[in-house]
Image (cartoon, rainbow, N blue to C red):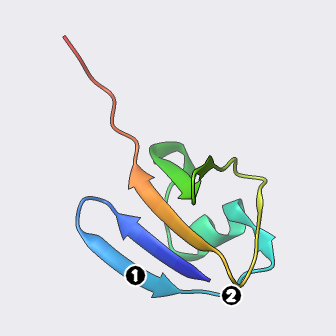
Amino acid sequence: MRVVLRMPERRELELKGGRPLRAVLEEIGVNPEGVVVVRGEELLTLDAWVEEEDTLEVLSAISGGA
């Protein structure tokens, strides 16, 4: 599986699939509460199952305002 991190610099990783998204984020040391993960056009939840052929984009979840 290809994982594209955009936090804020772009970095790509190749990881093993066939497991829940939460396990992938734990492996790469990313706090699941601080990111949004997208597969194609689909926003994923932490219990989503990810496979070898997937490409995931991990984006920093930034909030703010005035």
Q: Mark 2 — residue?
A: 16
Helix, strand or loop for disc 2: loop
- Residue 1 to residue 5: above or below: below
Judging depth in this view, the residue of 51 and 15 nearest the camera is 51
Residue 59: image location, x then y, percent: 41, 54
Quarter of the rendering occupied by the N terminus: bottom right
Is residue 57 left or right of 52 when viewed as pictured? left
Q: Position of residue 51 (x, y in %)?
A: 75, 77
Nearer-the-camera pick, 52 or 25: 52
The quadrant in which residue 61 appears is top left
Residue that appears at 64% across and 71% down: 24
Asked whether, in this view, residue 49 is left or right of residue 41, the answer is right
Residue 9 lies in what quarter of the image? bottom left
Q: Please, what secondary structure does the residue beneath circle 1 have?
A: strand
Toward the left, the furthest residue is 66
Q: Amino acid at mark 2?
A: Lys
Per the model, the C-alpha gap separating discs 1 and 2 is 13 Å
| Observer-nearest of 39 and 46 | 39
User: Which residue has dot 1 on it?
Assistant: 12
User: How many marks overall?
Assistant: 2
